[in-house]
Image (tube, rainbow, N blue to C red):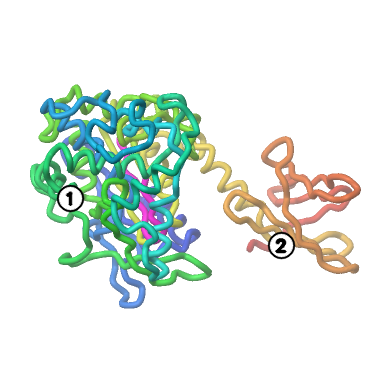
Amino acid sequence: MNFKEIEEYIQKKRQSSKAPSISICVFDSEKVLYANAFGFRNLELGLSATPYTIYGVGSITKSVTALCVLQLYEKGLLDLNDTVSQHLKSFGFDDSLVTIKHLLTHTSGMPSLGVAERIIAQRIAGEKSGVTNFDEFIGLLKRVNRVFRPGERFLYSNEGYMLLGKIVETVSGERYEDYVLKRVIKPLALVRTGFTLNGYEDVMTPYLIKTLPERSVFPNHSLLLPAGGLVSCVVELAQYARNFIVENESLLLTKQLLEEATRPHVKTNLPTLLEEEWYGYGWQVAKSFLGQTLVSHSGNIAVCSAYLGFLKDAKIGVALASNSATAPLAQIALYTLSVLLEKDPKKELSFVFLDELLDSFCGVYESFSGSTLVVRRSGYSLYAEITTQFGTERTALLPGKDFYSYYIPSYSGNIPVEFFTEKGEMRVLVERNLFKKISNP
């Protein structure tokens, strides 16, 4: 297969997002089909990224934590319907109601406390973490009021997976990271995967993306490990994911339990590029992506990000990672998978169509009277700067009835704005005033 189309899309997205680097690995149930990297793992030293560059993979870790819980279930050491308090005696949040399964599926009814986000922000800022250990975390948890009954509503919760990590420790008698090393990392012969960047070569330098990339620090913390503390490279992420699509028995878990982990259990309310997504045990599940079931998870910890996904029927997948939080890895993944399925992304993926359309709208326009209109985009929002003989006005263009229609809000009523092409050239009609595009951004 020719991967040039995918490479061009990655380069375009890397540049527009200001991501220093993006690494990719495409795989099937047996082998790596393609691996590459674009940009720099360290901008200051000019060090190129590779498919073996180690990144923080964030919430992809949740699938590993869920797998550990299922291993303990397989051994008969716990039941998914056990209440959390059966294994964590200090747990005080609806002791008799919240089960391990509720935590796995983010349905405990517990709202997000923002603990992980706060720790990450404080680490990046060089400040002391407000919550330093598990006992302090439990103390904070006990002060929270339940929002919904357990099982009633999906509420994505890093805190829930922090609790699952402690359950793994309590039941196994081992530290969480030691258990993962023995039961997941070593059986798969992963040598560039763990919970620290120390001791490896070819490691990312993390960056905060502001006007320009700004060198930062990796915000690791012991409390965050089960929810988002794993580090790895895209080649080894692919090696891990292959266990979920391999034909023969996995090294990690029975096929029946792997199937249970990747089965849709509860509908999510997470932002998605697809029509709808569900949650399994540590995995998101899209029931119909171009006629396939897509199992995936992304991760983002402010200075690095990752994506891991695979198609259960076609048995192909993609792993991506970046040393920034801005790289649109989910978009790149869906684009890559659509090309692998021999589909046209521009026809099949609405965000690809919308990206190209909005880009075509951007530029400098001029009217017959000499007024100018400059259209810019930020994400999927459009902004206009209109200059007439009376001065310059800056405004947002709000979406109208279709992709080509917008309006400018004003005190006297909405001013219609309509984009269209004439003889291959872009035009825009602002109420009665016609503007012709004279240059691109």
Neighbourhood count class around disc 2 (C-alpha, 10 Å): few under 14, some 14–19, many 20 upward: many
> On the image, which quarter does residue 296 sit in?
top left
Secondary structure found at label 2: strand
Residue 18: x %, y % from top left: 46, 63
| Residue at x 79% of width, y 50% of height | 408
In this rendering, the label closer to the viewer, 1 or 2: 1
Q: Which residue is tagged 2?
A: 364
Q: Which mark is residue 177?
A: 1
Q: Which mark is residue 167?
A: none
Q: Nearer the viewer, residue 319 or 424?
A: 319
> On the image, which quarter does residue 373 sit in?
bottom right
Q: Is residue 71 left or right of residue 335?
A: left
| Residue at x 24% of width, y 56% of height | 51
Please tell me which of labels 1 and 2 falls first in the chain: 1
Is residue 305 highlighted in magenta?
Answer: yes
| Residue at x 29% of width, y 58% of height | 221
Which image quarter holds the C terminus?
Answer: bottom right
Q: Give the magenta-colored segment's residue range.
A: 298-310
Q: Main secondary structure of the magenta part?
A: strand
Q: Nearer the viewer, residue 220 or 361?
A: 220
